[in-house]
Amino acid sequence: MAAKIRADRLLSNLGYGGRKEMTMAIKNGWFEIDGERMTNPSFKIDQDVIAQGRLAFDDAPLDPLAPFTIMLNKPAGYTCSKNDAGALVYELLPPRFALRKPTFSSIGRLDKASTGQLLFTDDGDLLHRIIHPKTVASKKYHVTLRDPLRGDEAKIFADTDFYMKGDDKPLKPAIWTATNENSGTMILSEGRYHQIRRMFETLDNEVTLLHRFQTGGLPLGDLAEGKWRILDKDDLAQIFA
């Protein structure tokens, strides 16, 4: 039988507020099960009831329990590191996500000027699988450059002996496909700091637009800029397909 959890503790663990705050919210009728208001904070709920989406808080469906993973379409101008100044990608998400237990965090990053697909999860195993060298999920980008392409970029980036400026370790081979004289798509199987920008800087060119549109087999799709959605089991399976 699935474990049960008190209603006030459940809401607190999902980041909706502290235990005392959630106790009052439930008593005031903010919590629903199957459309009926539940006003007993100590009522214990089966976790399978939670998984079936039968709960609501403040007239909105309750967030899923861990493991919980979402996809965000990051706009330019937002940073992924909480240590950087300026707008943070977390400001595009409900504040409660930052308060979830276990911790909710991004899988990889995009720099401030870059746009596109970001994944966030509280699933440590999933994060490990995506970034681990043996099971790393490739990432795909649209790239626009300041100067026209030389013509030999695909060969250079596919070389196992290509070094970026300042590095003492060669990059893993990357797949570059030109789409016109100053743009193309890049597929990476690793994620070093500002990697694509530095790859082209090594060739005396500059990336002016960088957009991630796919991780493994999971595309960003038609998700609007600045919006997010919850990923289901089929979505997660696509990453490693």
Image: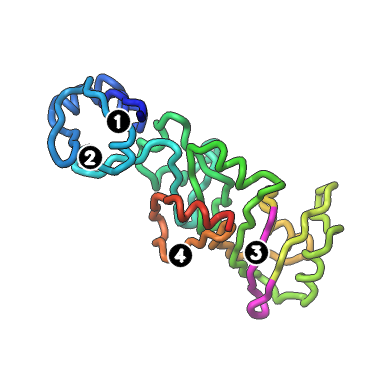
| Residue 209 visible in image | yes
- Residue type beneath disc 1: Asp
Q: Callout 2 environment at 10 Å: few (<14), some (14 to 19), or many (20+)?
A: some
Q: Nearer the viewer, mark 2 or mark 4?
A: 2
The alpha-carbon separation of the residues under discs 4 and 3 comes to 23 Å
Which tag, 1 or 4, sits closer to the chain's start?
Answer: 1
- Residue type beneath disc 2: Ala
Lateral position of residue 228 relative to residue 219, left or right: left
Q: Which residue sits at x=57%, y=51%?
A: 110
The alpha-carbon separation of the residues under discs 1 and 2 comes to 15 Å
Q: Secondary structure at mark 2?
A: strand
Q: Which residue sits at x=64%, y=72%?
A: 184
Q: Is residue 188 magenta?
A: yes
Q: Callout 1 environment at 10 Å: few (<14), some (14 to 19), or many (20+)?
A: few
Up-down: is 189 above or below 207? above
Q: Which residue position is annotated with label 3?
A: 207
- Residue type beneath disc 4: Gly
Q: Which mark is residue 221?
A: 4
Q: Which mark is residue 56?
A: 2
Q: Which residues are magenta?
A: 177-189
Q: Which residue position is annotated with label 1?
A: 46
Coloured how? rainbow
